[in-house]
Amino acid sequence: MIETLQYQINSNEYLSILFKKIFKRYWYIPTTSIIILAALSFIDIRWIFILLMCIFILIPFALAYLYIWHGLKQKATYSTTKKTVIINEFGLKLEFENGIKDISWDSFNSLSITPKALIFSYIESEYLFFIIPFSAFKSADDLRKTMSLIPKNITR
């Protein structure tokens, strides 16, 4: 059993990871649209106004929509709320200021290891994930023990 220090992920960090995951999969939609509109603006200057509307109205609207749809789900707020995590062979136990939440290892399907954190993706959606930053571990040995507790069925 490993207990982390009390930590909380900034909402901006969570959304940055969320937007990168979404853009990694759907990069071609805004890119193609911008290229086509930029090419059309050489034919008729009015297309540049449509391009600017896409950049300054549609793209921020899409980001706000993604924030509301994915970033405000209950499981997404587990990462952004102040907590202590206890890691054991059964899963994660989140101790918040106002309660406790158990999450079994079966709730996760993959683990991403970034330079700053462990990112566990939930089975329900690849855009719903739980983050444990490396700075939350008391020592490097705790991080090593955590990696050994993570079941093999969670892909890395």
Image: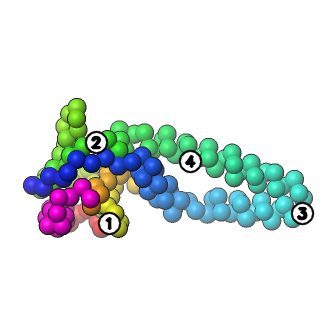
The front one of 81 and 44 is 81
Give the alpha-carbon distance from disc 4 to disc 2, as whole Å.
25 Å
Which percent across, then down, holds residue 92?
A: 19, 50
Determine the residue positioned at 65% across, 63% down: 31
| Amino acid tagged 4 | Leu
From this viewpoint, which residue is outermost toward the left?
1
The crowd level at tag 2 (other Cα within 10 Å; few <14, some 14-19, many 20+) is some
Start and end of the magenta stretch?
135-150
Q: Which residue is mark 3?
A: 43
Direction from residue 155 to residue 128 in the image, left or right: right
Determine the residue positioned at 12% across, 55% down: 2
Determine the residue positioned at 42% across, 53% down: 13
Q: How is the image coloured?
A: rainbow
What kind of element bears circle 3? Answer: loop
Marked residue nearer the N-terminal end (4 or 2):
4
Labels 4, 3: front one: 4
Labels 4, 2: front one: 2
Marked residue nearer the N-terminal end (4 or 3):
3
Q: Which residue is mark 2?
A: 82
| Amino acid tagged 3 | Ile
Q: Which residue is mark 1?
A: 113
* Mark 4 and mark 3 residues within 8 Å of each other at the beta carbon: no
| Amino acid tagged 1 | Ile
Marked residue nearer the N-terminal end (4 or 1):
4
Which percent across, then down, holds residue 102?
A: 19, 43
What kind of element bears circle 4? Answer: helix
Give the alpha-carbon distance from disc 3 to disc 1, as whole Å.
47 Å
What kind of element bears circle 2? Answer: loop
Inspect the magenta stretch and tell me whether residue 147 lies in it: yes
Give the alpha-carbon distance from disc 4 to disc 3, as whole Å.
30 Å
Marked residue nearer the N-terminal end (3 or 1):
3
Q: Which residue is mark 4?
A: 63
